Image (spheres, rainbow, N blue to C red):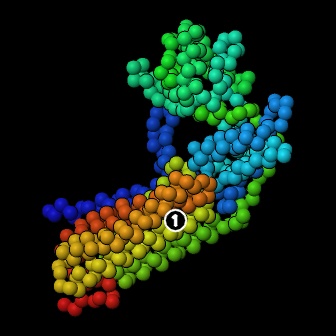
Amino acid sequence: MNKKKPVFFIVLIVAILMVYTAINGVTIPMGDTPSKIKGAPDMRYGTDIRGGVDAAFQPEGLDRKPTGDELEVARAIIETRLDQQNIMDREVTIDKDNGYIIVRFPWKADETDFDPEAAIAELGETAQLTFQDAEGNILLTGDHVAKASPTVDQSINQYVVSLSFDEEGAKLFSDATKSLVGKLINIYMDENLIQSATVNEHISSGSAQITGMDNYEQAKDISDKINSGALPFSMITKNYSTISPSLGAGALNIMLMAGAIAFGLICIFLVSYYKLPGFVACIALTIQVTGQILALSVPQMTLTLQGIAGIILSIGMGVDANVIISERISEEIKSGKSVASAIASGYKNAFTSVFDGNITVLIVAVILMIFGSGTMLSFAYSLFTGIVFNFLAGVTASRLMTTSLSSFKFLRNPKLYTCWSRRVTL
């Protein structure tokens, strides 16, 4: 049996699984806390599609108006928090005259009550983080923590919170642990104690661990609170309001219907004009689109109108790649080559054109991802993932499928691989 024959069915099964996951999501049982691969229903949409929250924050406990520099620092930190949570459709502005920070961001994917207070809590603690000794003396503040992350300490087989400090923080923490061996260091958000840790030894390396975590969720929760604790002052929500979607409630359903119809028409054209390579192209495009959906829904990247534009552009690049490949195969068969030879030569000769067109767009997407933010980042991410899946599906997977199908005797007819404008007379 030809070993290439099952390849088409393997790729087809992968495509079907991806479609199912993208449409419904998949829950994976993992003990008491099952993990879910989120699909399209769990996707987070931008304020232009689904609406969101508009909230104004003001400093708390200051006996003066915050300076412009302090507000800029707080604004940058809030933007970083939003970026870390993949919330790309957001606006963070400052009102220097009144000392406010105004934040606009979309609802969570699973939001059903549309409660602004619950949504605002997603931004993380707006209090100031401090490390204190048992007497309440502040040893260092959260802005000296470079990073906190949940990890597993293999030596004790437990979850811990790993801390790394900046240069000044490392010195302050070293001085603190040197004098507090055997004593407690308490971590506070304003007046709220979030964790206590016993100093077992003098730590001068600029990194440390907080042990005693019961599970990953607890370690991650504390890590998130520490990472978000570098605000220059405590903040409270002064007022908030909900944002209505600019496109209207039914716009998303209309876009989905239009996209499905357009995709169906493209597939009809590809199959009717390019025949078997067109059929393979439809499967490759399906893998590309579902791959993009999963790349957005699984990490909860916000999908905005700009992101949808990136998806459409990358689908166009995918169609273009498959058209170039199909045309090349037709040309090779028209020149008298066998089906197997034409497929090999067609993909080889088309690769340069497909690669050049996609790599230039990929470079632009990477540059936008590095320097962009907000909705620009949404566009860049959608475009980037689309081009990556175009290479995987439109070039690699389609070649595997076409080669596999051509290994079946009844599918070796050259007419099945030539487009209508290059019909072969046998």
Q: Position of residue 59 (x, y in %)?
A: 79, 36
Looking at the picture, tell me which residue is in the foreground, 138 or 199. 138
Q: Position of residue 204 (x, y in %)?
A: 49, 18
Q: Is residue 260 visible?
A: yes
In which quadrant of the rendered view does residue 153 lie?
top left
Q: Amino acid at mark 1?
A: Ile
Placement of 344 over or under 387, stated as above or below: below
Placement of 157 over or under 112, stated as above or below: above
Q: What residue does disc 1 label?
A: 311
Q: Residue at x 22, y 92 (%)?
A: 425
Looking at the picture, tell me which residue is in the foreground, 371 or 256. 371
Q: Is residue 107 left or right of residue 319?
A: right
Q: Position of residue 385 (x, y in %)?
A: 46, 58
Q: Residue at x 53, y 58 (%)?
A: 368
Mark 1, Cα crowd under 10 Å, few <14 / some 14-19 / many 20+, is many
Residue at the far left in the pictured view = 1
